[in-house]
Image: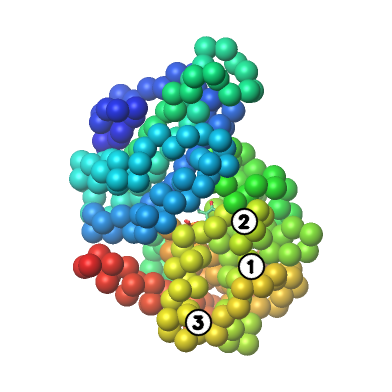
Amino acid sequence: SLCYLNGRYLPLEDAQVSPMDRGFLFGDGAYEVIPVYSRRPFRLDEHLARLASTLAAMRLPNPHAEQEWAAMVREVVDRNPWDDQSLYLQVTRGADMRRNHAFPEVVRPSVFLMSEALVTPSRELRESGASAVSAADFRWLRCDLKTTSLLANCLLRQHAVDQGCHETVLFRDGFLTEGSASSIFIVRDGVLLAPPKSHLMLPGITYDVVLELAAVNGLPHRVQEILEDEVRSADEVWMTSSTREVLAITRLDGRPVGEGRPGPVSEQMHAWYQAFKTTVMRG
Ligand code: PMP
């Protein structure tokens, strides 16, 4: 596949960065994953806005204006073979020839874009629903930032994979935060519930789309703190993300969620989401 690295478009196999890059040494970088449907990036402005807020919190000047980012994204999408893509974008604080935690005096950020074929959940997985385990959320207190320092997320995802499961649902101090790489929603008595955005979770782009679709379609919904017990006794539990879209979780810690099948509200939301994608693709 074709990627972009620091001003050049080149085959991914040929792309190289310095081992002194602070992304490699410290995980000192920001990233985004943008779904592309029929060669059109979905919610690009929102992804670029989230990138800008991660960079601002990192005190790393944004190396590109929004129109420049959009042009680079378009170029990488156009130069790759798939209609539906998962576009990955990363900015690190660049290389410095001395290893030092403090920022270099002159910062030359490393900018990298690549693309893969977009793989959304299979029909079988959507029909069975995903399995999840739970874990204590031991990440840091800036989970609202989309940084490449992902060791905790990797350990938490592997915790699920070790048990043959798809995702780990995280609880902090008895409250639901999110998944290792997804936002989590629940349904109780026909009401869709989502945890409020805070420094303890990533502000998901799909999370926003789901709440917009609930509002537009008149689905009762509330954003409020969700207790661990409310998740365990919920009628439905879902995970959402740019690549998993809306996916029901039908087993949690080996016990069925609700009836153990994807519930009607998740199926309705999945259908709304697919229809919404299609209108954006045509627009
Ligand atoms: N939370 C975490 C920790 C994630 O890694 C992701 C996926 N990037 C999400 C939530 C979902 O975010 P989005 O809907 O923007 O993909």
Task: Indicate the amino acid at tag 1.
Answer: Pro
Up-down: is 97 above or below 194? above
User: Does residue 80 appear in this view?
Assistant: no
Extreme residue toward the right, this view: 173
Q: Read off the residue under disc 2.
A: 201
Residue 174 location, x and y as percent?
78, 64
- Asked if the beta carbon under badge 2 is closer than 8 A to the nearest atom of ligand 1, the reply is yes
Question: Which one is earlier in the sequence, the residue at label 2 or at label 3?
Answer: 2
155 and 187: which is toward the camera: 187
Give the label, 3 or 1, closer to the camera.
1
Q: Is residue 262 left or right of residue 82?
A: right
- Asked if the beta carbon under badge 1 is closer than 8 A to the nearest atom of ligand 1, the reply is no
254 and 21: which is toward the camera: 21
Classify residue 191 by image quadrant. Answer: bottom right
Q: Quadrant of the N terminus?
A: top left
Q: Read off the residue under disc 1.
A: 195
Verify CB contact (< 8 Å) between mark 1 and mark 2.
yes
Q: Quadrant of the C terminus?
A: bottom left
Q: Read off the residue under disc 3.
A: 265
Up-down: is 8 above or below 74? above
Residue 39 location, x and y as percent?
23, 54
Kind of element beneath mark 1: loop
